[in-house]
Amino acid sequence: MPVLVQLNCDIRIIKFIYLMLKRPLTSAARGTAMSVYFLKESDLTFFLGRLLASSPVIAPVAKKSKFVFAELGSAAELRLDYDVTLLPPKTAFFPVKQKLLDFGPDGPKSAITPRKQVLFGVHFYDIKGIDMLDQLFAEGHRDNNYLANREATTVVGSSIQKVSSRAFFSTVGTDVQPRGHDAFLTHVTAGYVFETRTPKGEALISFGSFEKATAAQIEEAAGVNAAVLKRCPEKLEHSSELIAVKVRNAFANEELWTDLAKDCFSCGSCNIVCPTCYCFDVQDRWNLDQVSGTRHRTWDACLTNDFSKVSLGAGGSENFRERRGQRFRHRMMRKAAYLNEKLGGPACVGCGRCSAGCVPDIADPVRIINRIVGGRHGSSV
Ligand code: SF4
Ligand code: SF4
């Protein structure tokens, strides 16, 4: 490797480690639970019933043979045995379509109306996704449309009972700890170990018949959460730091990206299902009076053809990622390289939703990265 390229790689790795160390840690990230309780299996329904009487609860429910996060009508609808949901739980505070403001002759009026709610049963990889969005929406110009909803939400994680067929959460961003949740529920023998991590999480205890967990129950819960990491069907074979460098270095390999994207039909599904994607489009709807209206935002997807199209005025336009390969490359650069420094790790949590949602089955980050970096399941390019 030429000396200059090697030096460049080393500087990036040192910078990455520095950013990891200086990143502010919450008590949750340091693993300091407030308290650890035990809830009997038979008491879960009672707990949820009382919680539902107090505030809306968004949780995993069955939708035909798949699962979605939806507002619970009753405790019986809860499916903690889900593998993965179709859309990530970010929909609870960053909906697919969101009204931002009303405007009229007197100027704009904010449409932020956060409601107190509980987001229940979130797997740890999706907690990591939520934490990434928390950071991205809070940096620079704070996005209060997201942050107000997020602040009003109590997030309760849950252990993974079934692993989805495309998951690789155990080998991606292994240094990034899940944080930002208020409590975590682990299914153990005869019940659940319930760990509270914030005052919001601790406040939930009053809704159920909790007792202090024993040392044996806490140890069993730790074993359950460690064991699930060995059940991922797909695996990345290299560290996130090395992947970030190799993927970035593959930027100029046009042939590679054109080949990887040759079956892509630019549907954007791999973006839409992703817990860490956060691009949106803003549109104004004018009323007939031509002085008032509403402003909305809807999720957008960088794999679609017109995402990068900008107006040049006078009916002209320019698309700065016109080719499929360019768009495909952009997604992988964002997931594996560009955002690493900002987030302390890759912008991918290994949920496998994009792999499962891509009809030609070309979006799987494991296959793409292993092809770029090389290893047992791929060849270095
Ligand atoms: S889901 Fe697959 S086909 Fe659709 S945009 Fe993504 S890579 Fe292309
Ligand atoms: S890139 Fe794919 S596997 Fe990674 S977080 Fe997004 S949807 Fe999940």
Image: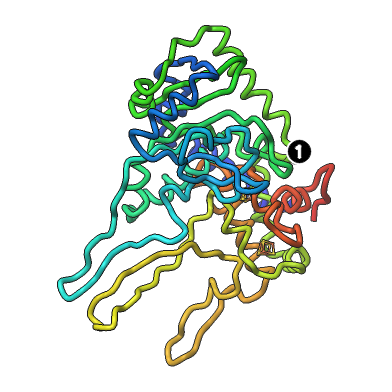
Q: Residue 192 appears at what percent x and percent y?
A: 54, 20
- Label 1: few (<14), some (14–19) or many (≥20) C-alpha neighbours in 10 Å: some
What amino acid type is highlighted by mark number 1? Pro
* Residue 346 to residue 25: above or below: below
Identify the residue at image location x=60%, y=39%.
173
Colouring of the image:
rainbow
Is 67 in front, or is 233?
67
Identify the residue at image location x=22%, y=67%.
108
Identify the residue at image location x=76%, y=48%.
370
Q: Residue 241 appears at what percent x and percent y?
A: 63, 42
Residue position marked by numbered label 1 in the rendering: 233
Q: Residue 226 appears at what percent x and percent y?
A: 64, 23
Q: Residue 197 appears at what percent x and percent y?
A: 41, 25
Quadrant, the C terminus: bottom right
Is 142 in front, or is 265?
265
**Mark 1 C-beta closer than 8 Å to ligand 2:** no
* Residue 338 to residue 130: above or below: below
Tally of numbered tags: 1
Left or right, 176 with respect to 101, comes to right
* Quarter assignment of residue 62: top right
Left or right, 192 with respect to 229, comes to left
Local SS, label 1: loop
